[in-house]
Image (cartoon, coloured by chain):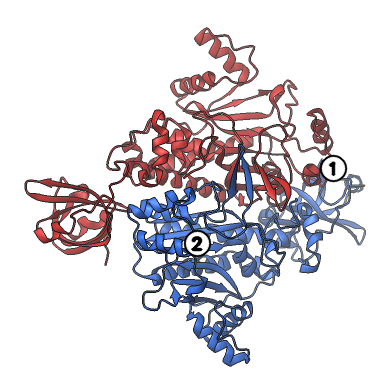
Chain colours: A red, B blue
Amino acid sequence: MRILSSDVHEHIGKEITVSGWLHKKRLLGGLTFISLRDRRGLVQIVIQNKDEVEKLRGMQIGTVLEVGGTVKDEPRAPGGAELHEATLTVLVPVTEEPPIEIDKPLSHKSDNLDTLFDYRVIGLRNLQEAKVFKIRAGLLKYLREFLTGQEFVEINTPKILAGATEGGAEVFKVDYFGREAVLAQSPQFYKQIMTGVFERVFEIAPAYRAELSATTRHVSEVTMLDIEMGFIDGHENVLDMVQDMTHYALTKTYEDFADELKSLNAPELVLTKKFPRYTVAEIHEMYTKATGTDTTKEKDMTPDEEKWICAYTKEHDGSEAVFVTHFPVEAMKFYHRVNPDDPSTVMWADLLFRGVEIATCPQRENNYEKLVEQMKKAGLDPEHPGYKYYLQAFKHGLPEHGGCGYGIDRLVQKTIGLANIKEAILFPRDINRLAP
Amino acid sequence: MRILSSDVHEHIGKEITVSGWLHKKRLLGGLTFISLRDRRGLVQIVIQNKDEVEKLRGMQIGTVLEVGGTVKDEPRAPGGAELHEATLTVLVPVTEEPPIEIDKPLSHKSDNLDTLFDYRVIGLRNLQEAKVFKIRAGLLKYLREFLTGQEFVEINTPKILAGATEGGAEVFKVDYFGREAVLAQSPQFYKQIMTGVFERVFEIAPAYRAELSATTRHVSEVTMLDIEMGFIDGHENVLDMVQDMTHYALTKTYEDFADELKSLNAPELVLTKKFPRYTVAEIHEMYTKATGTDTTKEKDMTPDEEKWICAYTKEHDGSEAVFVTHFPVEAMKFYHRVNPDDPSTVMWADLLFRGVEIATCPQRENNYEKLVEQMKKAGLDPEHPGYKYYLQAFKHGLPEHGGCGYGIDRLVQKTIGLANIKEAILFPRDINRLAP
């Protein structure tokens, strides 16, 4: 029976069998030491017998092995134990050296990302690299766990759409049986429609943006968590839900993956149960006062302000997550709800975390007539077939609702402290990269 | 504070507030009765006061209401209680009649599917229709729960690919910044690559097939669960895992959604812990003997045989799920593993459930040289850029592995007993339908 690396120390004095990939090989004091990698980590193995050592001749990192041996206590080995008197079976020989070293700390910087992704298939076998994606899976699990506990129903909505429905932004075109279709930039319309059925829905799925710029923040295929909730009693309800979900997922992940996060040099988590909330106007004023750079004439937040406010709330409010509220009406999308108490602002908040926007969390306009009016004002045609079904949901009654589009890749990036969003994605896509 | 429909009976004698959608309205013995729908179900409400009744004048099904009233014991009402002396607030007026009746049992048949989907946005508000998608969300939750418990790591892989990699089958083309790309038919290559990192991975994501035929089994955008596991000790390991996962998800779902499944007239679940396994050749023989139709010359299973074997195992083995093993080598894909004990068959099994194939569960060829040879034999060029990264994973060591592509839509369809796969999808896509 195969014993996994993390269980080896439970078998001291016994003969066991392990299997995995040859991860490292070295000669030390006349003995051959190898590290074997499996899904849980590494086992250190000492090969004393010359015939057994001979089996490794020409075998490179990546060779798949089954190894028998006796477990010895060894405090310096991973897990505090190692295998002695090893006997080897080569399951899959590898005779070519790996194109990159995989037994190294995570050292990729934004300046050698092309190398990172050219050798991604092998590079992910780096234990540090793999931790990024274990943490990612953990975050996804806890986000879903929270939402399911709050009666959000998981939905799957189509990613091939009849036409550009949100207007303006760049979309990818698909040849759909000879007709032109587009790839969904978000499940916005569908999740709003679905509040009419389940009140609360969520979806975790790919979304597509034909981003022409190659920055550290943009990729053309992202994983989005989309949430929408109906029968809210004000915009604050939406922010509370997004806040509680974020707090749950982050604290759970920091508990479960404490060792992984530490070894990746992830920052300590500084978070309050209630995230601070500031209006865009307040931040402009605070930032101008603090930095001497006048942003009070700006409508939107500047990237530097996003960084600044997160640093500020970390220090003053004890939270690296902060909501920026009351965006100016000039920046609104047609389906946002204008603030009835101040029509120069819209009921739209961004969740920032460690200097970047993780989620956009607006309340929607749920009145059919007002929505049609806002569409026309935005230069859109409510009669366009792309809007027909969407408007049907409002005509037949949608309650007050709001939600968020939550960037999973950005959350992973910022949780771990990766320089580039692409490092948080297994096989990223941008204007220059379509492989692997 | 808003009380949800399922909690109303806990407040007998008290004044409470509920909110939801006007679902039904009728006059009975001089009294006005309404049903209010919320995310949990229905509340029955009696309106005695004429001024309150007047507020509903012209208000159609779908109107969003907040209703105050006193809870009375009423065994004939849903939940055993109803609201009396109701006072109404119209939150969102709806003045147009719904295009279809939503307060009816689920009656759609394959012959009026176009009507079903033309009015899908409103039709999903039918309580029966909504149950289908609650059950779907439940199945997804339990599939993930099982896999996470077995150390499968969730991955997200790109759906925009550089070129058709699996050869042959119809793919959708995407204009990727002026270059031609395609939509992924499956994450096949990526999940195999990822066994080299995590041994066990899974993904639940959309997959795309440009299906030219409009049948009850085919759609162009499906939701697939893809699983892959390394360090297997024979093909049986894969089947055991898929079997245990299916057993877990189905039994849990049948427990949790017992009422919903019953009200949808879903069949009783007939399942054994160990699913019966028959070879294709055995089934040809059994079927020929039983029906008099000779299929012994057939290579693949016929659709009628798929139905027949499921009925047979239900009766004789106590299981509606059955593995069909040892597919003939003629039907293999280049990445399948040929059966070393019988080169006329391939280590590929299908999981059938209630008459259709739910999952394809092959073992893969993990030897680099053999794989390249099989590619060439299949007429594929191993030097093609689409294969470069895939082959890299093998060259640097992949253990014996296998997995499955598991159709979520088919699973939902068959669990509930829906006639057409499209009924298991919120907003299906086929050659004729790209909206809503």
Few, some or many C-alpha atoms within 10 Å of disc 1 (few <14, some 14-19, many ≥20)?
many
Residue drawn at the location 69% of the way across and 68% of the way down: B418
Q: Amino acid at mark 1?
A: Pro
Q: Nearer the viewer, residue A21 or B407?
A: A21
B27 left or right, relative to B108: right
Counting from the top left corner in percent of width and height, residue A105 is at 29, 37
Q: Quick one: which residue is furthest to the left in this view?
A: A29
Residue topped by disc 2: B379
Answer with mark 2 or mark 1, whichever residue precedes in sequence: 1
Residue A199 visible? The answer is no
Q: Chain of mark 2?
A: B
Counting from the top left corner in percent of width and height, residue B48 is at 87, 52
Q: Chain of mark 1?
A: B
Q: Quick one: which residue is furthest to the top in this view?
A: A292
Residue topped by disc 1: B93
Counting from the top left corner in percent of width and height, residue B393 is at 38, 52
Q: Nearer the viewer, residue B132 or A303?
A: A303
| Mark 1, secondary structure of its residue | loop
Quadrant containing the N terminus of chain B is top right
B87 left or right, relative to A46: right
Counting every numbered tag in the picture gives: 2
Residue B263 visible? The answer is yes
Counting from the top left corner in percent of width and height, residue A64 is at 28, 57
Q: Of circles 2 and 1, which is in front?
A: 2
Q: Nearer the viewer, residue A34 or A139?
A: A34
B23 left or right, relative to B55: left
Locate residue B305: give its quadrant: bottom right
- Between the residue at mark 2 and the residue at mark 1, the CA separation in whole angstroms equals 63 Å
Residue drawn at the location 46% of the way across and 61% of the way down: B146
Q: Is residue A190 above or below residue A335?
A: below
